[in-house]
Amino acid sequence: MALPIAELRDRFLALQREIVSSLEAFDGEPFHTDAWSRPAGDRLQGDGLTRLIENGRFFERGGCNFSHVRGASLPPSATAHRQELAGRPFEALGVSLVLHPRNPYCPTVHLNVRFFVAHSNDTQPDVWWFGGGMDLTPYYPFVEDIVHFHRTCRDAVHAGGGDDTCYREWKTWCDRYFFLKHRNEPRGVGGLFFDDLGADGNTPFDAAQRLTFAVGDHFLPAYLPIVARRRHHPYGERERQFQCYRRGRYVEFNLVWDRGTIFGLQTGGRTESILMSLPPVVHWRYDWHPEAGSPEARLYELLTPRDWAFEGSHGNEQSTSE
């Protein structure tokens, strides 16, 4: 089958435009646009569109990237669990987003939807697959916000033609993936994560594409209602310091464990676009632990994975008092 790369490219770009337009309206400041290309002869060829905001009215830093790249050989990060693809030329395109609000009561969020193809060699045909997901990283979490995010993730799977079995699998995969093994703690409260969708030949292309874009289309309804509720929540230096401390966990995960970051760096990708996911202000403190019973300690209680989408809304249960 001829892969509809041009059609996929248009859909990813349309998703990026829709998301950025909504985020600009929410923040009140425009995103900077940086179109880039890598010419023939470079280790990694292709082009992309980086959309970035820094020091916005609401977002302290955020970016929504589109990229479409080609390389001569898949790197180790992409073939560790599928050695049969090692050495194959590849093509990859998709959208990746990370948003860091300034207000500590508003969570950081991540979205990625992508398509890969390992091109044919002398003996094997093309192998293609979709992947992606979204996850939430709060600092002072509200249970009703976590429940909303997970229920919208479940809605995304259903809208794409999946069922609760698929949702639970991707939710559990997210809990496992966004885990800092060196600290034995989750990065946040999870969401969805999936990879290799279609690679085994059991999921038709149209079904895999539909599921993937359903996840992308549900990002705005999953996230914007949360930050709309919390954007004016008062905070002080204590909350800001804790936010910056916990942002350190975000940096550690992205630089040590995140396969997307490692893939980009291993293939010689565009460093500025790859590292746009990092927060602008971060603190590390030696062997610090929150005081028992404090609002900061409450975060660690809620990091334990739970079946959020199937629980009651717990609308009055939250990390701090109003």
Image (spheres, helix red, strand yellow):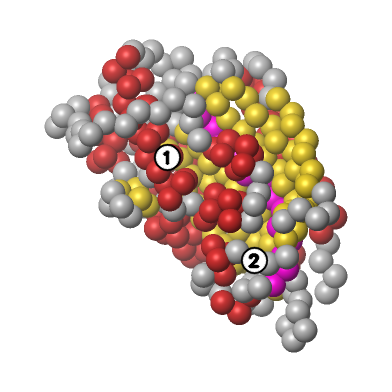
In percent of width and height, residue 192 lies at 50, 52
Q: Quick one: 187 or 42, which is closer to the camera?
A: 42
Q: Earlier in the sequence, mark 1 or mark 2?
A: 2
Q: Secondary structure at mark 1?
A: helix
Q: Quick one: 258 or 38, which is closer to the camera?
A: 38
Q: Quick one: 139 or 93, which is closer to the camera?
A: 93
Q: Is residue 97 magenta?
A: yes
Is residue 141 something one can see in this rendering? no
In percent of width and height, residue 19 lies at 68, 35
Residue type at tag 2: Leu
Residue type at tag 1: Tyr
Please name the residue that numbered disc 1 is placed on. Answer: 250
Q: Quadrant of residue 160?
A: bottom right
In the rendered image, the quadrant that contains the C terminus is: top left
Q: Is residue 204 left or right of residue 196?
A: right
Q: Is residue 311 left or right of residue 288?
A: right
Q: Residues within 10 Å of mark 2 (few under 14, many from 20)?
A: many
260 shown above or below 282 = below
Q: Quick one: 205 or 127, which is closer to the camera?
A: 127
Give the number of the mark in front: 1 or 2: 2
Q: Secondary structure at mark 2?
A: loop
252 shown above or below 290 = below
Q: Which mark is residue 74?
A: 2
Q: Is residue 7 magenta?
A: no
Residue at 70 percent of width and 36 percent of height = 50
Main SS category, magenta section: strand
Which residues make up the magenta segment? 88-101
Residue at 37 percent of width and 35 percent of height = 248
